[in-house]
């Protein structure tokens, strides 16, 4: 509990210092990069950065039960979705390599030294790490990692569903 309170305090401090709010009047989501999210013809809402164009706000809310209020670009290719209280919901990391030399596992077939489960039917290859609560997939010249930051009853199922959405949007 103390960690969660500290996280809220830190998130609030970062938001105040950065001059960013979680939502605009009317509840529209925004990202910390200053860009406005875009809504597609189907009504789905996406952030403006490439990593935020892989999974919609609505897909995350439906899968996790936590409605993300904003997406924060925390590094090159890394998007952190947070709820209105500043708690993490999902992190999406997008890495591209025109040479296609991407992998989700180390040479020994592990992820961060832990065993992984191969997942078929998503991209060119995909693995699930129950230890990291992450799914990593490779499709063409892109590697995407989706990491849950919120509690769900079926973390693997939720992450697989979101990864299928993301893989379908990779070009």
Image (tube, rainbow, N blue to C red):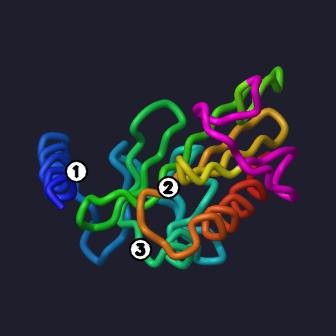
Between label 3 and label 1, give the one nearer the viewer.
Answer: 3
Task: Determine which of the numbered discs, if any, sits on residue 66 in the image.
Answer: 3
Q: Quadrant of residue 41?
A: bottom right
Q: Quadrant of residue 73?
A: top left
Q: Residue at x 77, y 48 (%)?
A: 126
Note whether 156 is above or below 80 in the view shown: below
Q: Position of residue 161 (x, y in %)?
A: 69, 68
**Drawn side of residue 120 relative to residue 138, left or right:** right
Q: CA distance from mark 3 to mark 1?
A: 20 Å
The residue nearer to you, when weighing 62 against 125, is 125
Residue 36 visible in the current orientation:
no
Note whether 67 is above or below 13 in the view shown: below
Q: CA distance from mark 2 to mark 3?
A: 17 Å
Q: Position of residue 40 (x, y in %)?
A: 61, 68
Residue matched to label 1: 20
Q: Position of residue 80 (x, y in %)?
A: 43, 49
Note whether 96 is above or below 19 in the view shown: above
The residue nearer to you, when weighing 167 against 114, is 114
Q: Which residues are magenta?
A: 107-127
Going from N to C along the chain, the mark reached first, 2 or 1, is 1
Residue matched to label 2: 47
Whether label 3 touches label 1, CB < 8 Å? no
Name the quarter where the N terminus is drawn: bottom left
Going from N to C along the chain, the mark reached first, 2 or 3, is 2
Q: Residue at x 59, y 54 (%)?
A: 130
Note whether 157 is above or below 134 in the view shown: below
Q: Residue at x 19, y 41 (%)?
A: 18
**Element at label 1:** loop
**Drawn side of residue 35 relative to residue 126, left or right:** left
Task: Please tell me whether the stretch drawn in magenta is mainly helix, strand or loop.
Answer: loop
**Element at label 3:** loop
Task: Determine which of the numbered discs, if any, sits on residue 50 in the image.
Answer: none
């Amino acid at each position: 509990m103390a960690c969660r309170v500290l996280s809220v305090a830190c998130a609030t401090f970062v938001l105040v210092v950065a001059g960013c709010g979680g939502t605009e009047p009317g509840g529209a989501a925004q990202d910390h990069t200053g860009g406005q999210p875009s809504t597609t013809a189907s009504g789905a809402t996406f952030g403006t950065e490439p990593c935020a164009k892989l999974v919609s706000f609505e897909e995350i809310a439906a899968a996790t039960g936590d409605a993300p209020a904003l997406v924060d670009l925390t590094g090159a290719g890394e998007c952190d979705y947070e709820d209105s209280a500043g708690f993490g919901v999902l992190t999406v990391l997008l890495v591209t390599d025109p040479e296609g030399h991407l992998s989700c596992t180390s040479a020994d077939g592990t992820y961060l030294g832990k065993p992984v489960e191969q997942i078929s039917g998503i991209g060119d290859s995909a693995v699930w790490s129950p230890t990291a609560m992450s799914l990593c997939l490779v499709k063409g010249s892109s590697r995407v990692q989706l990491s849950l930051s919120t509690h769900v009853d079926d973390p693997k199922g939720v992450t697989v569903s979101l990864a299928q959405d993301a893989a379908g949007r990779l070009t």
